[in-house]
Image (cartoon, rainbow, N blue to C red):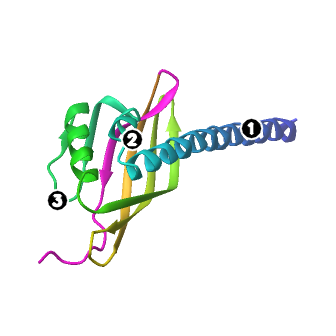
Amino acid sequence: MKYFINLAIAVLISGSVSVLVSADSDVAAEINKQNAKYMTAFNEGDVDAVMKLHTKNVRTMMPDQPAAVGHEAVRAAIASETSGPAKLTLHLAATDVHAAGDTAYEKGQWTMLVQPDGAEDITDSGPYLVIWKKVGGEWLIHFDAVFPGQSPPKK
């Protein structure tokens, strides 16, 4: 009898683990789709489309910039970044996604290609951390922290 109880417990545990893995896999797939939308919009300089992927109470922390709190502050920061004279190409690669209810976190690696007019291209990369909130059935960025990469020293 003890064998059957242990077997039943093992089956229940393994079933629970696969459900959790499946749930995280589903969330990771949804977040990867959101990241694809983000990269396309950012790389095209479409600030409106980028902002549709954020909650209204979003907070961001970017290297060498003050924290941006709220939709309008984040919009201004992204608009400033994407409106410069250099062409920017952002790539995001999620390495870890976990969810609990309507909240998920994503760790990953960002890479930015900066193509200034009349100057040599610069590629930089570093880690990031995003907290996502599910709002109206859609995963939106609620907190975004981008950590410094290995860019050349400022002159």
How dense is the environment of label 1, judged by Cα within 10 Å: few (below 14), some, or many (20 and up)? few
Q: Which residues are magenta?
A: 136-155
The dot on residue 131 is: 2
Q: Is residue 95 visible?
A: yes
Q: Residue at x 16, y 59 (%)?
A: 64
Asked if labels 2 and 3 touch by Cβ distance under 8 angstroms, the answer is no
How dense is the environment of label 2, judged by Cα within 10 Å: few (below 14), some, or many (20 and up)? many
Question: Mark 1: which secondary structure?
Answer: helix
Q: Identify the residue at the far front of this view.
A: 118
Residue picked out by circle 1: 15
Q: CA distance from mark 2 to mark 1?
A: 27 Å
Label located before the other in sequence (3 or 2) = 3
Q: CA distance from mark 3 to mark 1?
A: 46 Å
Q: Residue at x 50, y 28 (%)?
A: 138
Residue type at numbered disc 1: Gly
If the image is split into quadrants, where does the C terminus sit? bottom left
